[in-house]
Amino acid sequence: RTKQQGRHGYTLFNHELRLNQADQLALESELRRALEVDDQLTPFFQPFIDAKSGALQGFEALVRWQHPTRGLISPAIFLPMAEESGLIMRVDRYMIEAAARQLRQWMDEGRLTDGVSLHINLSSANFHDPELLNWMQALIRRYALPAGMLHLEVTESALIDVPDVAAEVIQGLHNMGVRLALDDFGTGYSALSYLHRYHFDVLKIDQSFVADLDQKQESAAIVRAILALAEALDLDVVAEGVETGMQLRTLRDMGCSKLQGFYFATPAPAARIDWDRLAGFASSFRQVA
Ligand code: C2E
Ligand code: MG
Ligand code: MG
Ligand code: MG
C-alpha cells in the first residue's frame, strides 16, 4: 500500500469523483481491456450476520477494479462510466460468475451450507436483456448451485425506466428460484409500488438511516416503519452500514433480522476473509443475550 491510499485502500484518484472527458475515455478502454484480458476486476465480499444469534447469514459481492497503474478503483468511480458505455452488463455478468465460482468453492470446502446466501448487485441495464435468464440458468447448472442461495440486489431507481421488461426478467428470475433484494431501500421514489408489483424477497435498509439511527428520531422512525412493512409483507430485512455496537443493539431491539457493516467486517477479497472472526460473533452474541 502506498501513502496515497486511504481508509479503504483506494487511491486518491478515487476522490476526484468527477473525471474529465479524456480520463473517462481512457478509463473506458481500460475497462474494456480489463474485462477481456485478466483478473483486474475482482469481487470483494462483505458478510452479513443474524442479528439475534450472530451466525453468518451470507455475503454481498462488491466489485473492485485492481488497476495495474491506478491502484484499486472504487465502483463509485467506474460504474457510472460503465453504465454510460453499456459495459455494465459485462461487469455484472463477470461479477455474478466470479461470485458463483467462489460460492461453489466455499461449499466444496465445507465453509458454507445452503442456509446462507450470496448477494450480487445488478444494474438496471440487465432488465433490457431477457437473455440474462438463460445465462443465469446455465450458470446455476454449471456450478451446481441451489438457485435460492443467489440473491440479486437491485435499487429502486433501477426499476423506474423499465417497468415492463423489468417485470419479465424479475418474474423469470423468481421462477428460477433466484431471490431478489431491493437495495438502498427508502432512498428511491416509489418504493412501495415496486414492492407491490414485483416479487422481492429481501429489503435492504439504506445505510443513511442506520448512520443516523441513534441521533435522529426521524431515522429511527423510518427504520421502524420499514421493519413493520417487511414483516407485514413477509420480507426478510438486512440493515446496511452498521458501524457501531449501539447501532447493532438498536437494530436488534427493533427486530431487524440481519445486519451488515464495517462493525462486523469491511469488504475483503476471498483470501482475506477472517473466518474465525466471523465465527466469533455467534459466541459473543450468546454472552450478551
Ligand atoms: P451497495 O450495493 O448499497 O453496497 C453497499 C456499499 O456500502 C458498499 O460500497 C460497501 O462497501 C459500503 N459499506 C458496507 N458497510 C458499510 C458501513 O458500515 N459503512 C459505510 N459507510 N459503508 C459501508 P462499495 O463497495 O463502494 O459499492 C458501492 C455501490 O456500487 C454498491 O452499493 C452498489 O450499488 C454498486 N456496486 C458494487 N458492486 C457492484 C456490481 O458488481 N455490479 C453493480 N451493478 N453494482 C455494484
Ligand atoms: Mg448492494
Ligand atoms: Mg445498499
Ligand atoms: Mg448503495
Image (cartoon, rainbow, N blue to C red):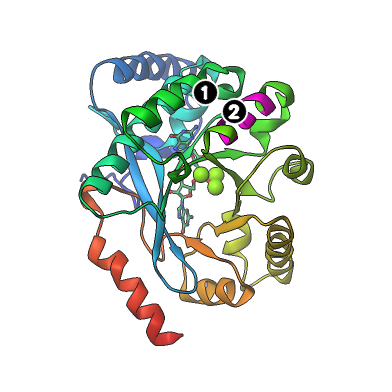
Helix, strand or loop: magenta stretch: helix
**Residue 3 visible within the image:** no
Give whichever of 40, 133 is nearer the camera: 133
Where residue 278 appears, x then y in whole percent?
A: 31, 65
Q: How much space separates mark 2 and mark 1, taking CA atoms?
A: 6 Å
The reply to whether callout 2 and callout 1 are in contact (CB within 8 Å) is: yes
Residue 230 placement, left or right of 76: right
Question: Residue 119: within the magenta?
Answer: no
Magenta highlight range = 167-174
What residue is pinned by disc 1?
A: 133
Residue 182 placement, left or right of 49: right
Q: Is residue 16 above or below residue 33?
A: below
Give whichever of 23, 112 is nearer the camera: 112
Residue at 39% in and 67% down: 55
* SS assignment at label 1: helix
The label on residue 172 is 2
The label on residue 46 is none
Residue at 55% in and 57% down: 238
Residue at 58% in and 75% down: 250
Residue 81 placement, left or right of 2: right
Give, as a three-letter code, the residue at label 1.
Leu
Give, as a three-letter code, the residue at label 2.
Gly
* SS assignment at label 2: helix
Where residue 112 appears, x then y in whole percent?
A: 31, 54
Quarter holding residue 16:
top left
| Upstream in sequence: badge 2 or badge 1 | 1
